[in-house]
Image (spheres, rainbow, N blue to C red):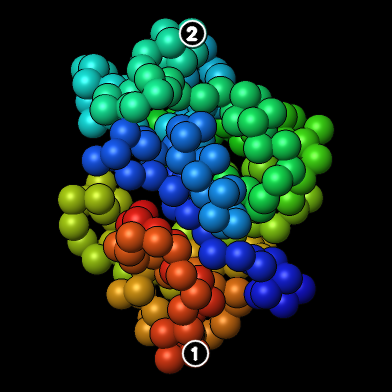
Amino acid sequence: MTDEALFPRPIAHRGLHDRANGIIENTAAAFEAAIAENYSIECDLQLTSDGEPVVFHDDALERLLGLDGLVADIDLATLCATPLLDSRDQDCPLRLADFLDLIQGRTLLQIELKRQRDSDATHLLARTAAELIKSYEGPVTIESFDPELITLIQRFGFNGPRGIITFDYAESGATQSMSEEQRYQLRHLLHWHQTQFDFISCEKSALMLPAIKFWREPWQTGDLLDRPQRCRSAGRARLVRSDSF
């Protein structure tokens, strides 16, 4: 499959959101705005305390809901009844099932499975997502920073394109808990024998890493932009998404 066939449109990262105007990321308003502009949609999946997949980016609740604690420590009913901060329409987080019902195949979905706190949650997120997506009639791709998640979702029955999200894995706050060996394996995509990914999403800073240059799969780069736009970046990237990872 060519990159143009896999990603025929620019992708709105977490929907086409604009917090200053009351359109919050990963909400019905942001997704409808993306569809109105003829964009594909990227969204994020987390797992609630009662094991339900919900469309939400952060591990913590504070930035988007003004609450203490983590998504993994709050139940679905409470989370999905809490309006997001600054939302013009009082949008609340969406269950995955409600999100799929909202989109109804109108555009390509790129669903990111967020890294979970332990193996049980990782397996549960992959399994529940695969079960819900199985009956969805519309184009879907799956991606994750976690090689285990994109491996498991295929094992649980998802047969669509799967991608690995990557960056340079320099030692920083986001990677301090990882060993140098773990960072090396992720930086150089040494999980290929396990994941057999179909595409790569990477930060622009990682475009010249040897592994990225070697694979030359359909790529995406993340950058801070007001609108999604096509980009070739010296022939090395296919799409730029609006917003950072």
Q: Earlier in the sequence, mark 1 or mark 2?
A: 2
For image coordinates 51% across by 25% down, the residue present is: 94
Answer with the quarter of the image where residue 2 lies.
Answer: bottom right
| 3D distance between C-alphas at marks 1 and 2 | 46 Å
Secondary structure, mark 1, is loop
Q: Residues within 10 Å of mark 2 (few under 14, many from 20)?
A: few
In the image, residue 75 sits, relative to residue 211, either above or below, namely above
Compared across the picture, whether 70 is left or right of 156 comes to left
The numbered dot on residue 77 is: 2
Quadrant where the N terminus sits is: bottom right
For image coordinates 48% across by 84% down, the residue present is: 232
Q: Which percent across, then down, holds residue 197?
A: 63, 63
Q: Which percent across, then down, holds residue 165?
A: 47, 59
Q: Nearer the viewer, residue 178 or 216?
A: 216
Answer with the quarter of the image where residue 51 lies.
Answer: top right
Q: Mark 1 = which residue?
A: 235
Q: Nearer the viewer, residue 74 or 151?
A: 74
Compared across the picture, whether 60 is left or right of 89 comes to left
Q: Which percent across, then down, holds residue 42?
A: 52, 49
Quadrant where the C terminus sits is: bottom left
Q: Which percent across, then down, holds residue 41?
A: 55, 50
Q: Residue furthest bottom?
A: 234
Secondary structure, mark 2, is helix
For image coordinates 67% across by 50% down, the residue present is: 107
Residue 28 seen from this side: yes
Residue type at mark 2: give it: Ala
Residue type at mark 1: give it: Gly
